[in-house]
């Protein structure tokens, strides 16, 4: 039961990390101290997506699921949980590169808006 709960917590952490990678610049607009953390997260997320490597959180979640007596899953977090909902059938390497580029482009646009807006940190 504990391993099942831990696996669920890793799943939520993983989802939160992905959301932070994709749109964390919106948080940076309000909390400038998050800038280095967000840039590192974007670099990691884009590198994992572009390289096709497995995120360590996927391995941890699978390990915890197996310790709980449940089956793990093949592929990555995105493949297992999100592809059916968000991505078209037959995710290709080219599509993965496109997703990585889209994440970088979205964050670049958000950061340009932050810099032009000149908002001060509101901590």
Image (cartoon, rainbow, N blue to C red):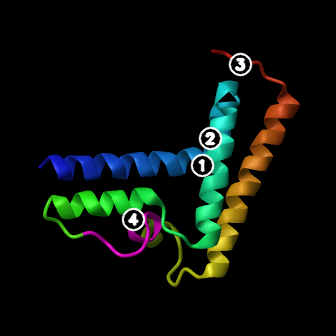
Q: Secondary structure at mark 2?
A: loop
Q: Which mark is residue 24?
A: 2
- Residue 34: percent from left, percent from top: 64, 31
Looking at the image, which residue is at 25% across and 57% down?
Answer: 64
Q: CA distance from mark 2 to mark 1?
A: 6 Å
Of labels 1 and 3, earlier in sequence is 1
Q: Which mark is residue 81?
A: 4
- Crowdedness of circle 1 by 10 Å Cα count: few (<14), some, many (20+)? many
Looking at the image, which residue is at 68% across and 72% down?
Answer: 97
Above or below — where is 41 with respect to 67?
above
Of labels 4 and 1, earlier in sequence is 1
Decide if residue 11 is on the left or right side of residue 64.
Answer: right
- 2 and 1 marks in contact (CB < 8 Å): yes
- 4 and 3 marks in contact (CB < 8 Å): no
- Residue 44: percent from left, percent from top: 61, 54
Magenta range is 72-81
- Crowdedness of circle 2 by 10 Å Cα count: few (<14), some, many (20+)? many
Above or below — where is 26 with respect to 13?
above
- 2 and 3 marks in contact (CB < 8 Å): no
Of labels 2 and 3, earlier in sequence is 2
Q: Secondary structure at mark 1?
A: helix
Which residue lies most toward the right here? 116
- 2 and 4 marks in contact (CB < 8 Å): no
Q: CA distance from mark 1 to mark 3?
A: 20 Å
- Residue 75: percent from left, percent from top: 41, 74
| Number of numbered discs overlaid on the protein picture | 4
Q: Which residue is mark 3?
A: 121
Q: Which residue is mark 1?
A: 21
């Amino acid at each position: 039961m504990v391993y099942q709960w831990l696996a669920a917590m890793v799943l939520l952490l993983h989802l939160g990390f992905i959301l932070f990678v994709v749109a964390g610049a919106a948080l940076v607009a309000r909390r400038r101290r998050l800038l280095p953390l967000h840039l590192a997260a974007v670099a990691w997320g884009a590198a994992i997506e572009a390289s096709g490597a497995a995120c360590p959180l996927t391995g941890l979640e699978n390990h915890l699921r197996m310790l709980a007596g449940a089956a793990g899953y093949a592929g990555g977090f995105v493949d297992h949980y999100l592809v059916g909902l968000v991505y078209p059938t037959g995710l290709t390497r080219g599509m993965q590169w496109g997703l990585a580029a889209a994440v970088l482009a979205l964050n670049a646009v958000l950061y340009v808006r932050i810099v032009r807006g000149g908002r001060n940190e509101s901590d």
